[in-house]
Image (spheres, rainbow, N blue to C red):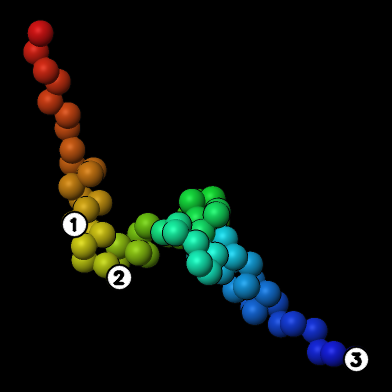
Amino acid sequence: MDDPIPIQLAVEDKLSETIVPKCGSTAKIGPDYNGTLGRFIDSYWDVQRAKRNSPSLRRAYKAIRGFEPILAKR
């Protein structure tokens, strides 16, 4: 009997199928890139942890949080 495929490899294969364009395709991203990224962000990504590890994200976050739109006067 063949050994079962380790779960990690199966997950990586599925991930690859969704975010990487098919070989020979002119697409820049895979067929479910945005959906996969969204699910990752909703389920696993922690902005606070990410900010600790990324100075550029920390600066961007600070700029966005401090943004106040200037409404055009009519």
**Which residue is painted at 18% across and 38% down in the image?**
67
How far separated are the C-alphas under marks 2 and 1?
12 Å
Pinpoint residue 13: horizontal percent, then vertical percent: 62, 73
**Looking at the rendered structure, which numbered label has been put on residue 53?**
2
Whole-number angstrom distance, CA of label 2 to CA of label 3: 45 Å
Query: In the visual, does 56 lie left or right of 33?
Result: left
* Picture quarter with the C terminus: top left
The one of 16 and 21 positioned closer to us in this rendering: 21
Amino acid type indicated by mark 2: Asn
Amino acid under disc 1: Arg
In terms of secondary structure, where does tag 3 sit? loop
Horizontal side of 66 relative to 53 (left or right) equals: left
Q: Mark 2 or mark 1: name the one nearer the start of the chain.
A: 2
Q: Residues within 10 Å of mark 3 (few under 14, many from 20)?
A: few
Element type where label 1 sits in the image:
helix
Q: Secondary structure at mark 2?
A: helix
Mark carried by residue 21? none
Query: Please, what is the three-letter code of the amino acid marked with disc 3?
Result: Met
Residue 14, compared with residue 42, is above or below; it is below
List the single residue furthest toward the right: 1
Q: Which residue is mark 3?
A: 1
Q: Is residue 65 above or below residue 43?
A: above
Specify the label residue 59 is tagged with: 1
Residue 11 position, x and y percent, is 64, 71
Q: Position of residue 47 (x, y in %)?
A: 37, 57
Q: Residue furthest left?
A: 73
Q: Residue at x 21, y 62 (%)?
A: 56
Decide which of tag 1 and tag 3 comes sooner along the chain.
Answer: 3
Q: CA distance from mark 1 to mark 3?
A: 54 Å
Residue at left offset 11%, top offset 18% = 72
